[in-house]
Image (tube, rainbow, N blue to C red):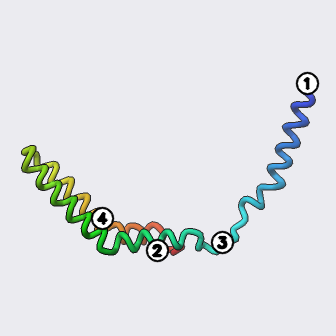
Amino acid sequence: MLKKAGILSLLIVALVLTLAPLALANNGNGTEFQSIYDRVMGWVTGMPAIIIAIAVAIIGVVRAFQSGSFMWAFAGICVAALIFLLPSITQGLGGCTF
């Protein structure tokens, strides 16, 4: 039984080593996610991002007045700033491939 398990393990390792170069082949020229990237960048740099950022900032300020805590306004403004900075962050993360 132990001998069969050893031979089976050896065959599995040989199969994995044989097929590994096929899995690591780079045949996409770096454009696999270009359509998704273009769509997300369109959303983030367009009118939806501006509307969402302004809405989040306003909701944060309104919630700050309701609760009496300044942290809600600070969080709303920080999220709005993050939404406005998202295109440059995305370019910085993937600038070499996009």
Identity, as a three-letter code, of the amino acid under mark 1: Met
The residues bearing labels 2 and 1 have C-alpha atoms spaced at a distance of 56 Å
- Residue in the image at 55% along x and 68% along y: 33
Q: Which callout, 4 or 3, points at the residue further toward the start of the chain?
A: 3
Q: Which element carries disc 2, helix, strand or loop?
A: helix
Q: Which mark is residue 83?
A: 4
Q: CA distance from mark 1 to mark 4?
A: 61 Å
Q: Is residue 74 left or right of residue 38?
A: left
Which residue has dot 2 on it? 38
Q: Check the image and report above or below for 59 versus 69.
A: below
N-terminal of the two: label 1 or label 4?
Answer: 1
What is the C-alpha distance between the residues marked 2 and 4?
A: 16 Å
- Disc number placed over residue 28 in the picture, else none: 3
What whole-number distance in Å separates the C-alpha atoms at marks 2 and 3?
17 Å
Q: Judge by depth and name the residue closer to the eye, 5 or 46.
A: 46
- Where is residue 47? Give x, y as percent: 29, 73
Query: Mark 1 sits on what residue?
Result: 1
Q: Residues within 10 Å of mark 1 (few under 14, many from 20)?
A: few
